[in-house]
Each structure stands twice: as C-alpha cells, then as structure tokens.
Amino acid sequence: MCGIVGYIGPRDATPIILNGLKRLEYRGYDSAGIAVFNGGQLEVRKDAGKLSQLIDLVNKSPINGAPGIGHTRWATHGAPSQRNAHPHVSRNGRVVVVQNGIVENFLELKEELMAEGVEFQSDTDTETIVHLVEHYLATGLDLVEAARRTFNQIQGANVVVLMSADEPDKIVTARIGNAGGVVIGLGEDENFLASDTPAIMDHTRNVIFLESRQMATVTRSDVCIQTLDGNKIKPQTHSVSWDPVAAEKGEYRHFMQKEIHEQVRAVTDTLAGRVDFGRGEIRLPDLKLTKELANKIEKIYITACGTAAYAGMVGKYLIEKIARVPTEVVIASEFRYSDPVVDDKTVVLAISQSGETADTLAAMEEGRRKGAVVWSIVNAIGSQAMRTADGFISMQTGPEIGVASTKAFVAPLVDQYMLAILLADLRGVIDEKTRKALVADLRLIPDLVGRTLDREAEVEKVAYALKDVRDCLYLGRGINMPIAYEGALKLKEISYIHAEGYPAGEMKHGPIALIDKAMPVVCLAPKDPWHEKMISQIQQAKARGGTVIAIATDGDELIDGMADHILWVPETPWMLLPVVTVLPLQMLAYHIAAIRGLDIDQPRNLAKSVTVE
Ligand code: AGP
C-alpha cells in the first residue's frame, strides 16, 4: 500500500518523513524514496527494497532542509526498481511528484507528452504528472494553477503531492476522485501531510482531511483548500484523539466505515506488483503457477466461510468464464465431510482474510491429504493459510479491524479476476487481444469504486427508510447473485435484521410468498447479462406490494420509476461489477446499524477470526 508523508517548516524534513513512512511500513511496499529542498536545491534519494535501504542511503549521503516529501511504493506500472521508485522529477529538475493510485489515462497522456518530445525516465504512470505540471509551468502559470490544470486531466482515484524548486514555500496536494485519504497536520509555524493519520501523529493532533476532488496548498503558516474546479473552501479542522485506536480511525466513526472507504486503495493495492498495464500482463509470483501446472488442472474447488465464500462464488463465475476451468465452491465447514472428488489435477483454493479460520484450514488440509495443489488468497501476512499453501495471493489490503468484512471481500474479487486471466493465458484459451482488454479494464476499477463510495449520502437516506424493518430479501442473478448473499450477510451481522440472499430466479419457487408491504426486496439489477431477467423480477416484487430497492447502472431508464429506491452505480465492465455493486450494500448495512446505534465494529456473538470448528 503506497504511503506518503510531507513536511514544511523550519526543521529538517528528512527524519520527520522517514519516521512517518516507518509508521506506514506495515501496510506493505516494494520501494521507497524522498525528495527534499536544500536551499533551493532539489535532492532525491530513492531505491527498490525496504525503508531501511533508503535510510542507509540517506545516512551515507544526508539530505537536509525542507520542505520535503517521501513515498513508499507498491508497483503497478513498471517493476520495483530505483528508476520507477517515487519521487519523480521533471525534465528541468525543478518539479517533483509522488502519487498513490493509478492514472487511468496515462497511456494517452504519455503519448501526447512524447509527441511533444518528452523522454520518460521510468515506466510509471506517475511520471506523466510531473511532465504535465512542467508543461503548464512553462506557459507562465504558477505551481498551484499548473497543478490544478494537471489534476483535472488525470482520470482515476489518486492522491498526488507536488513541490517546485521555484516556489519552495509550498507543497501542493490533491485527492482526485475518492482516492485513499490525504490528512494535513497543523503545527506551529510548520505543517505536515500524509496519506494516513498515524504517520504524523507524533507531531500534531489538529488535522484537516481533504475531500474527494479537493486540493490543498500547504505552506509553513497556512493551508489553502480549493476544489479541483478552483472554488475556495473553508477548511474544517478536526482534533484527532491521543488514543492510538481512535487516531487510526481518522475521520471515520467506525473502522467498518473507514474500511469501506479504504476500498479504493484496497483494489489498487491488490493490483500492485501483479499487473503490468503497459504490457497487459498479470504476474502472480507467489502462486507459483507454471504453464505446466495450468494445463494440468482439471478442476478447482474454492473453499471458504461466510463473506470469503461469497467472494469465491464470484470467483467461480470469473474462472469458468475467462479460463474455462470447471470450478465449484464448497463452504469450508462442509468440504472435509463431503468426501470431495479430489486428485493431483485438482486445485483447492482457500479464501480467508484472517488466514486462521479453522474450517478453512481443515479444508485445505483435506485437499492436501487427497493430493490436490493447495492455494490460498489471504489478507493476514504470515498466517497459517498463507504459510501452508503451495502458492498464495496476498490481498495486500492492510489489516481489517471491523468484524464485518468489507475490503477483504472486494480484494479477492480482483485477485480471482487476475487469477482467471493468468490461468486462461497459460492454458491458451484467450488470445493476446482479449487478455489485454481484460487487463485494461482493471485500470478503471479504483475510480469506479471511488465514484460509488462518493454516493454515501444517498445510501444513508435509504438507510433511514429501512431502519425499522424486521426482514429483508436480497435478490441477484449470475455474477451478482453472490452479492445478494453478501449484502444480506452484512445487514444481518451488524444490524441484527433478518435478511436472506437468494438467486432471483428461485424467488418464484418459494420466497415470493413472503413478499408484502413489510418485506423490502433489494434487487441487484445493474447492466450485466442478466439485466432483463432482473427487471422482470422487480416487476414481480412490485406486483405483490413489495418495496423494491434496486442497485442499478447510471442512466438505466427502465428501472427509473419502477423501484421505490434506487442506489445508482457507475457503468462498469460486467465481470468486475461485483466489486462495485457490493459497495452500496455495505454502506446500507453500515448506516442502518449506525442509525440503530449498534456496536458496528464488534457485533454481538461474532469474532474477527473464527479459530474453532
Ligand atoms: C464477514 O463479514 C464475517 N464476519 C465472516 O463471514 C467471515 O467472512 C468468515 O468468518 C470468514 O473469515 P476469514 O475470511 O477470516 O476466513
């Protein structure tokens, strides 16, 4: 997970930045770098590897002065290397940038810049930003306006931080799209900024959180905030608690809400180091998937519990659709007792955020006993499910604290999409063009997630309408059917409202009897291959007096006017839709529970890690 720390003030920036980056180290990264202005002279140190290597570099060749910015990178564009590490410097050596996120339109921007004669020094998308800023500065604009123009050209969910040797009295930062956060820490004659609150908590508790599509100009004595459209905003200062747990929550009321909003970052980070957008390739080195093994596999069993199992159900669609490998999902607590047909041509793929769930570990063990290749998709680094697997994919989303799993649900959706592409490629079932198109769609995901999360206020209104219901039915079809299960699970586990997820086509075989005025029906009806079927489902529910809450794609006129409430999601490539459609359901469950005043992060009777059978 990329981290950013910045400092402006009378002290040396280097130790402040390195200590801040250290606080973010546990989130994972593959390279690190720092840029500091020393008497107007820009100095950069960066390298692949751990922060300790950067610290060695700085010890050998110290950099003093301020302001400064530092970054830990997880590669998305170009391998982890010295040249791809941030910060990136403009051609004239006057401007420097760090970024978290993916510049979706970087190929177009890069082509335009190259046509103007810009030679790129790295393979990164980030480098386009610094060249664009330099381009606008050359037209006579000041840094803030050059940065603003640049931010408006970038598509994606990104956090960007910039400095210029010609205006060393300021750091400019922006939150473009609903990217992971930017927190600005306010000091006495000095200011700080970071991607995460813990990075600056040694220095100040008074902070400003940037909202989506806002930028800030940070000087020693002032913070000026404006929207990316150029409208000035009066900053709202928050006082962050000294309690480290509360400090970690930052601007959010609960960890679950924080983790819901961290999903832009979660999907970006799980791509990090795995996707080469330039070549349109997927690499999952920890999975140890060779061409020989890919061609040997005859069947995949996905095994997991609860939310992780629902993620696996989406994975089944993806693996079968893209790689054409027969795939079955078996709830882990059933797997070992069902005498599954497993041999050495079978893969048992376990999904678990904790990596310590007893039933999931037992299912992995059963797979191994029967001779299968055992893989896992795990969030907790070093957990048993990671250690004991023949190959694994790390979700790379950082710790999940809320008992109700959110970011550890969307990350494995993206991981399984990548796995399906890799498998398909190695088995020769997709051509290069299809592979590149599937990989290119991944670029869109962080921004789509961010835009969906931006609609939280509308979800909250619907939450008020549903806060007193006793039961709720969730219906979905095809790739969105597991999202109906997951939406219902989220609601029941944190709001204690009885909720059922159902394959929509099954409604007429029984559950339709339940529908009346008191039974809201949440219908997943985005524009996917099952869209028309879901429309008729909505009509059937309405005909029986049900209150329908539809999850629908922006601009869907068929649904507009048909459902009682609509939670809109942006148009999304259909195989990646579950990453987006689950978000309003997470927010809905969260807000209903919040309105009911419940203990959201630690719901009754539940544990984060279920280590007993
Ligand atoms: C999710 O919100 C639940 N708390 C629960 O279903 C969870 O997903 C399940 O217990 C599996 O946990 P794991 O991912 O740690 O294996």
Image: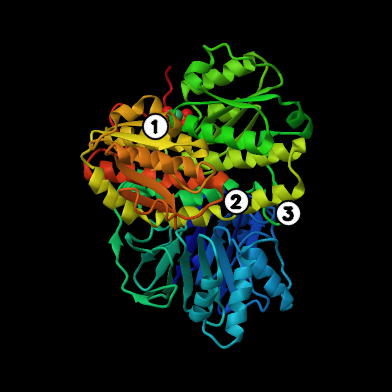
Q: Quadrant of ligand 1?
A: top left
Q: CA distance from mark 3 to mark 1?
A: 40 Å
Residue type beneath disc 3: Arg
Q: CA distance from mark 3 to mark 2?
A: 13 Å
Residue position for label 3: 279
Q: Nearer the viewer, residue 26 or 467?
A: 467
**Number of marks drawn:** 3
Q: Quadrant of the C terminus?
A: top left
Q: Secondary structure at mark 1?
A: strand
Residue position for label 2: 442
**Is residue 198 left or right of 372 when viewed as pictured?**
left
Reading the chain from its start, which is encountered first: label 3 or label 1? 3
Q: Secondary structure at mark 2?
A: helix
Q: Residue furthest front?
A: 543
Residue position for label 1: 501
3 vs 1, front mark: 1
- Label 3 CB, ligand 1: below 8 Å? no
Q: Secondary structure at mark 3?
A: loop
Residue at left offset 50%, top offset 67%? 13
Q: Nearer the viewer, residue 228 or 78?
A: 228
What mark, if any, has residue 177 been given in the picture?
none
Asked whether residue 487 is in view, the answer is yes
Reading the chain from its start, which is encountered first: label 2 or label 1? 2
Residue type beneath disc 2: Leu
Residue type beneath disc 1: Gly
